[in-house]
Amino acid sequence: MKTTILGVLVLMAALVGCSESKKGAKRPEKTEPTAPVTKEETSIEPVIDDTAAKQTEEEEEPAEVPTADTKAAAELAEKERIAAAARKAERDGFLAIQERAVGTEFAEIELRDRTYATASIKAIDDEGIRIVHKDGALKIKWAEVPPGYQKEWGYDEKRDAELESVKTEIAAGEEPPTEVAGTTEPTPMETAKEEARLNAIKRNEIQRKHSELDDKLRKLNDDIVATRSKRIQLASHYRAEDSGRAPGAKTHSTIRQKNLGQLDAHIAKLDAAIANTQSLIRKLKTQ
C-alpha cells in the first residue's frame, strides 16, 4: 500500500515538472527577409591622407638671431624715420603758411629800403617772395625779407640752410645722387638737393632766354633808330628838291610816297616787335 502511494506521488511530481518546462519555453521571433548583399556593396575604398604628400620636403631656414650690429642699425633706422616724419610735419606747416600768404595785398609795403604802393604777394618759394606792385614786379630773397614778414610768410630756415648746402655742392661740380632700384624713399636732404638742382637748371634757362631777348631788343632798337633817321633824311632831301625846282616841274610824288610809306611800315613793324619783346622780358622777370 505504501509502495503504491509513493509511486503515485513520484508520477505526479514528474507531470508537474513537465508542465513547467513547457510554460518557460519561448516562441521564435519572426524576422523580415533581407536582400542579399552584393560584392560591390561590401567593398570599402580606403581613405588616403595626402596631407603629408603636399608638404614641402625642404626644411625651413632657422630664424636669424639679431646681433648687436643689427639691433643698432634697426634703432638708427627708427630714429631716422621719426626725425624724417617730424621734419615733414614741420615742412608741411611752413608750406601751409606760405599758401595762405599768397594773394595778400598791401596799400604800401617797405622792402629793400623802398616803399612799394598797391602791392600784393604773387608767389612764395624756397628762394623768396615775388611781389607785384603798381610800377612792376620784383623778387626778394628770404635774407632780404624783414624778420617780421619772414615769420608771417612761412620762412623755413632749415630749408634755406639745406638749399645753400646744395648750391655749394653744385658749384663745386658734384653730381646729384642717382636713384638706385629698391631703395627707400629719399630723405629730406636728398629731396632738397634734387629740387635745388632743378631750380638751378630752370634759373639758367631763364637767364639764357633773358639774354637772348635782351640782344634781340637791342638790335630792334638799333634798327628802328636807323630807319627813323633814314626817313628823316629822305624827307629832308625831298623838301630840298622841291625848294630848288622850277614852278610846274614834275616832282615824282608817287615814288616819294612809296619810299616814305615803306619806311613807315618798317618802323611800325619794329615798334610791334619791340613791344612784344619787352612783354616777354617782363614775364621772365616774374618767374
Image (spheres, rainbow, N blue to C red):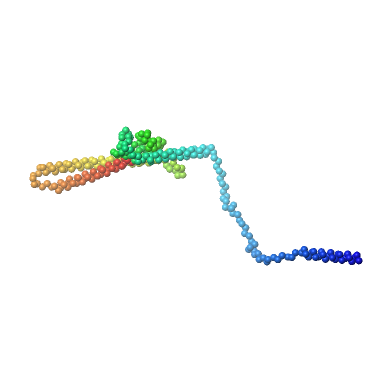
Q: Quadrant of the N terminus?
A: bottom right
Is residue 138 visible from the viewing direction of this image?
Answer: no
Is residue 48 visible from the viewing direction of this image?
Answer: yes
Q: How many marks?
A: 0
At 37% from the left edge and 39% from the top edge, which residue is drawn? 101
Q: Quadrant of the C terminus?
A: top left
Q: Nearer the viewer, residue 150 or 211?
A: 150
Compared with 56, 199 (above or below) is: above
Image quadrant of residue 146?
top left
At 55% from the left edge and 43% from the top edge, which residue is drawn? 63
Q: Farthest residue in the right direction? A: 1
User: In x, y percent, where is residue 33?
Assistant: 68, 66
User: In x, y percent, where is residue 31?
Assistant: 69, 65
Image quadrant of residue 283?
top left
Compared with 49, 113 (above or below) is: above
Lateral position of residue 131 relative to residue 61, left or right: left
At 41% from the left edge and 36% from the top edge, which residue is drawn? 158
At 75% from the left edge and 64% from the top edge, which residue is drawn? 26
User: In x, y percent, where is residue 186?
Assistant: 44, 41
User: In x, y percent, where is residue 244?
Assistant: 10, 42
Q: Nearer the viewer, residue 101 or 247?
A: 101
Image quadrant of residue 205?
top left
Lateral position of residue 274 relative to residue 64, left or right: left
Q: Farthest residue in the top direction? A: 113
